[in-house]
Amino acid sequence: MTANGGVDPTALVHASAIVEDGATIGANCRIGPFCVIGAQVTLGAGVEVKSHVVITGDTEVGDETVIFPFSVIGEIPQDLKFAGEDTRLIIGKRNRIREHVTMNTGTAGGGHVTRIGDDGLFMAGCHVAHDAQIGNNVILVNNVAVAGHVIIEDDVIVGGLSGLHQWIRIGRGAIIGALSMVTADVVPHGLVQGPRGELDGLNLVGLKRRGVARSDIAALRAAFQALKTGDGAFRDRAAALADGTDSDYVRELVAFVTGDSDRGFLTPK
């Protein structure tokens, strides 16, 4: 395999698959029947592409990722402002991309790149739109729709049939309940549920599963209560939490709320 593309001799490509000239297919890849791999695609080592998958555009797929049938990866954005500019989709390592998932490249207005981290699970029917930035260990359950420019930090779970509005941020470790429409930023480790998503607590189950210290969980619970009942605007309440805390988790929450955002926040009920 050369820098200018090619199929590694250890790769297995089904006779009915189409691999366009210029594509780079890494060592020990497996490409199943009736797949189409475009000329600008790069597949890392050990990638498995099952049958009837289309990977196109300037798309990079990380090592040991598995893509299931009828997914379309790297097509142009569903954005009428897109004018054919050169944009990319970068997918990390060891992702599981299930049936009928769609992931689009970026746009000039969003930094030109849609980016997926490592070790994600994207269940059947999910959509990841242009310029989304998705972290590591993220789970999108069946038919989740991620709009353009959304940022999802590490260790987030989004329940089935949920929608994430364009430009919002979902903080690390948050969990979104099924059938939720999320239209504003979600603080790290937040718990959101309801048809029009409301911040309804902390993702305590997720914190415990990740082995977070009880002292940090207690500090987060106290911080959440202060956000819920304190005086002043939401950002002011968050900024006040920075004084006197020894918890990195609380500092992370403060930094998230006081950082730059194009949208407001889901606030505690």
Image: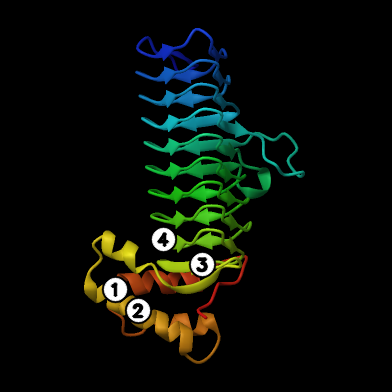
Quadrant for residue 168, please give it.
bottom right
- Judge by depth and name the residue closer to the eye, 108 or 137: 137
Mark 1 to mark 3: distance in Å? 20 Å
**Spot occupied by residue 224 in the image (x, y as percentages of width and height):** 41, 79
- N-terminal-most mark, 3 or 2: 3
The quadrant of the rendering that contains the N terminus is: top left
Specify the amino acid type for callout 2.
Answer: Arg
The residue identified by callout 2 is 221
The residue identified by callout 1 is 217
The residue identified by callout 4 is 172
Helix, strand, or loop for circle 1? helix
**Closer to the eye: label 1 or 4:** 1
- Judge by depth and name the residue closer to the eye, 184 or 158: 158
Mark 4 to mark 3: distance in Å? 17 Å
Specify the amino acid type for callout 1.
Answer: Ile
- The residue located at (58%, 44%) in the rendering is 127
Mark 3 to mark 2: distance in Å? 18 Å
Mark 1 to mark 4: distance in Å? 14 Å
The residue identified by callout 3 is 193
